[in-house]
Image (cartoon, rainbow, N blue to C red):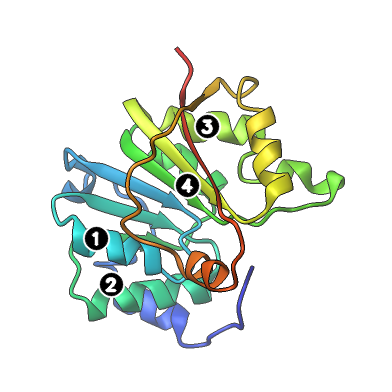
Amino acid sequence: MRGRYKDWTPGYIDAHPEVSPRNIELADPYYSHPRLVLEIGSGKGGFLTQMGLLHPEINYLGLERDVSSCGTAARKAVELSLTNVRFLNLDFDVAFFPLSSLRFEKIHVNFPDPWPKARHEKRRLLFPTRLSNILSLLAPDGLLEFRTDNLPLFEYALEHLEEAGASLLEPPYPEEEARSEYEERFLAEGIKINRALIGRKG
């Protein structure tokens, strides 16, 4: 869900390439860090900045296609003086090829757009071919953690795991260390959060 456009955000992103570079430069030492974690659809950055504070030993990368949300996230990282969190104003389909040589120990997908209409199925972030691409970025023992308030989307993703070469891992889940803005709001409203841990098959 997109918020209102903030006209200051494109300029802010340009002024702070240390937290929101315009391109993925794999020669940058940031990407050769032994521990990398990715969030796809990082929104305003609440989840990833919390994780960055909790785990300075990990380098985090967030993808967010909405420029206003990405700029807001970048400002949070700057205000918190985080050097282990970056936000890229890119859609996953655009970022996939530049990232394809990297391996992430964990990938987070938090509350993506459900695209509920059947004609929009291919736009869903966890559409099988796209999910397969996401899983290919995982390290051998890596995990994809998926959270959503939307039960039909959750069931859709689980139904298509085998097609995407994925498998559902059994609980217990890792302890929740951080929450996105959406999750905080939904929990305050008493809305159930559906959560799954997904790994590559085999």
Q: Distance from label 2 to label 3 (Cα)?
A: 28 Å
Q: Secondary structure at mark 1?
A: helix
User: If the image is split into quadrants, where does the C terminus sit?
Assistant: top left
First in sequence: mark 1 vs mark 3:
1
Q: Which label is found at residue 133?
A: 3
Q: Is residue 172 above or below residue 194?
A: above
Image location of residue 69, percent across then percent down:
49, 73
In the image, 36 versus 89, the foreground residue is 36
First in sequence: mark 1 vs mark 4:
1
Q: Secondary structure at mark 2?
A: helix
Which mark's residue is nearer the viewer, 1 or 3? 1
In the image, 89 versus 55, the foreground residue is 55
Residue at 49% in and 61% down: 64
- On the image, numbered disc 1 is attached to which residue? 52
Q: Which class describes the residues within 10 Å of circle 3: few (<14), some (14-19), or many (20+)?
A: some
- On the image, numbered disc 4 is attached to which residue? 95
Q: Amino acid at mark 4?
A: Ala
First in sequence: mark 4 vs mark 3:
4
Q: Distance from label 4 to label 3 (Cα)?
A: 11 Å
First in sequence: mark 2 vs mark 4:
2
Which mark's residue is nearer the viewer, 1 or 4? 1
Q: Distance from label 1 to label 4 (Cα)?
A: 21 Å
Q: Residue furthest left?
A: 57
- On the image, numbered disc 2 is attached to which residue? 77
**Image-based side of 44 in relation to 163, left or right:** left
Q: Distance from label 2 to label 1 (Cα)?
A: 9 Å
